[in-house]
Image (tube, rainbow, N blue to C red):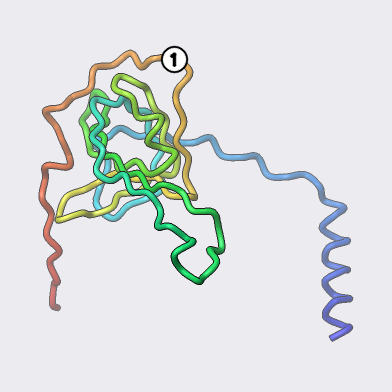
Amino acid sequence: MATRSGNRQQANAGGAANTAKPAKRKPVFIKVDQLKPGTSGHNLTVKVVNANTVLSKKPRNPSSSLRVPARPQQNTRITECLVGDESGSILFTARNDQVDMMKPDATIILRNAKIDMFKGSMRLAVDKWGRVEVAAGPANFVVNEENNLSLVEYELVNVEE
């Protein structure tokens, strides 16, 4: 076991000499009409058309149970927002802190977004590995609500060979 840690220390010492980090990649932003089911890692700049609260739930009273909660309880909030750009629109599921940013006509930058399937239709979501931020300035495009990707229903088909 001592040899393993010794090897690790030698490998770390060799790596310390080479402190040049590789350059970070620039994010590639795509348009809404390029989204496909089951994909992730999308970066988009979208405008919020509307926002509808789906769930606003307060936590259960922890004093009624004998178990001590591991983390502080907070409200669970879910809002479905129609977002889009000039190429199309899609429903975005905002959760908890993301809900506060979803004001109509706000320009939002979504990083590392993913496509969730809900009842056969696509929904856009950003989990803990992604980021939702309000853009510095308003977007200079009009949202194309005619091409709503969430209205397209998909069906999983198993292909036998």
Query: Is 61 on the left-hand or right-hand side of 155?
Result: right
Farthest residue in the bottom direction? 1
Query: Is 134 on the left-hand or right-hand side of 115?
Result: right
Q: Does residue 104 sit above or below 9 in this rendering?
A: above
Give the percent coordinates (x, y) of residue 102.
Answer: 35, 29
Give the percent coordinates (x, y) of residue 5.
Answer: 85, 76
Farthest residue in the front direction? 64
Query: Counting other residues with Cα less than 10 Å from the Cα at mark 1, is it few (<14), some (14-19), or many (20 or more)?
Result: few
Reading the image, the residue beneath label 1 is 137
Give the percent coordinates (x, y) of residue 117.
Answer: 23, 54
- Image quadrant where one finds the C terminus: bottom left
Quarter of image, res 43: top left
Kindly identify the residue that appears in the image at 31 percent across and 24 percent down: 47
Callout 1 amino acid: Gly
Disc 1 element:
loop
Give the camera-side residue of 101 and 26. 101
Kindly identify the residue that appears in the image at 44 percent across and 26 percent down: 134
Q: Does residue 146 sit above or below 92 in this rendering?
A: above
